[in-house]
Amino acid sequence: MIYLDNAATSWPKPPQVIQAILDVLKRGCANPGRSAHAMARQAEDALLSVREVIANFFNINDPMRIAFMPNTTYALNTAIYGVITRGSTVVTTAMEHNSVLRPLKTLEKEGTINLEIIKPDKYGKVSIQNIKKTLRKGIELFCMTLSSNVTGAIMPVAEAGKICRAHGITFLVDAAQGAGVIPIDVEKMNIDLLAFPGHKGLFGPQGTAGLYVREGVIIKPLVQGGTGSFSDRLVQPEIFPDVLESGTLNVPGIVGLGKGILFINDTGIENIQFQKKSLLEMLFDGLGRESNINIYSPPPEQNSGILALSVQDMDSSEVSYLLDRKFGICTRSGFHCAPLSHLALGTTDTGLVRISPGYFNNETEIELAIKAIQSIARGMY
Ligand SMILES: Cc1ncc(COP(=O)(O)O)c(C=O)c1O
């Protein structure tokens, strides 16, 4: 089997991630922040050290401003519902995932917010000129993805951050695609809220993610309940990260996520970038000249690691089905939870086949994938 669906979740995981999860489960996995016994303290310390690893990775000053979440969707919903106020204006882009678009559209429909959506170019890239034209004083929140989950187009986050800061707009970045490949510095990029997955580019297991909230940003919790702190009170504690971390956390998963980030630090993010870019270049070279194939992704240097394509006269799900059943190659087809991206790209009829290689793929696998896609495009399968 050749796994080329790393934009959905990364696989395989580095051995040290798997080992760390097993070790936690075997050696002791008490509930952190609840009881005061040695095993619970050990779990609490383990979480603190992962918060420190994450803070260091994203240049976050205070590790306690990072709240662990079960997935990026939860982190994005927490950020959106937590900061908006009734009657405010929120801006986002047409390249967002439904985990941003659905909550915002719901809030717009019920009359809570005014919503403005910025359109991208033909490769799904949102230009800084369009962002500049739209953002202005008085806007409460700007939500933007670091990179498109449909085309891989890298967005001008650092430039957008500067504009947000100048206008006093709270800046929420969805780093589901790109964290672990594109260096993120919340200070330099002026990011106020960073939603990141553990299970994609950071090599952690599923069920891990986080939300960073800059000091001074006022946020209400999406979920309230037991935090292990101030247990005698009937109201949610306001201290971080407790305010956003109700309920038992995924300790083994979070420890695995910490090891995933350390793996990136040891490997070098630039080497991960280089490997993914080389594999993407092979895909572009091998498929770019095929007459029945249309490519919708920007070139590798502007791309976080996705090649999105369509094969003439075929539905994307048929192409992915054949790749899986006839060639043992895992890709994703359809609309990728990003309906406005497909409107902008003109691909609402067939959807797109998304090929997303990861750091652990090799050239032989990419050569086999190219041959398989060529065979399908030529009707020779
Ligand atoms: C851009 C983007 N945002 C958000 C999400 C949601 O991530 P999760 O599955 O971790 O909730 C995804 C998932 O693929 C994504 O690609």
Image (cartoon, helix red, strand yellow):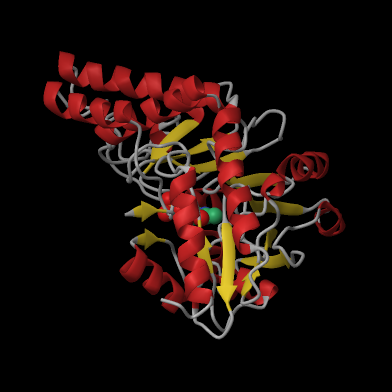
Percent x, y of residue 187: 68, 28
Q: Nearer the viewer, residue 311 or 34?
A: 311
Q: Residue at x 49, y 49 (%)?
A: 357
Residue 42 shows in this picture: yes
Q: Measured from the top left, where is residue 308 in percent x and y?
A: 58, 63
Please say if 263 is above or below 335: above
Tell me if 324 is positioned left or right of 8 in this view. left
Q: Which residue is located at x 68 percent, y 72 percent?
A: 345
Quadrant placement of the N terminus: bottom left
Say whether residue 90 is left or right of residue 44. Answer: right
Q: Is residue 75 left or right of residue 104?
A: left
Quarter location, residue 73: bottom left
Q: Nearer the viewer, residue 378 or 250?
A: 378
Question: Percent position (x, y) of residue 189?
Answer: 71, 35
Establish if 287 lies above or below 312: above
Q: Nearer the viewer, residue 213 or 99?
A: 99
Does 10 appear above or below 120? above
Please indicate, yes or no, whether residue 74 appears anywhere in the rendered image: no
Q: Quadrant of residue 338?
A: bottom right
Could you tell me which quadrant the C terminus lies in? bottom left
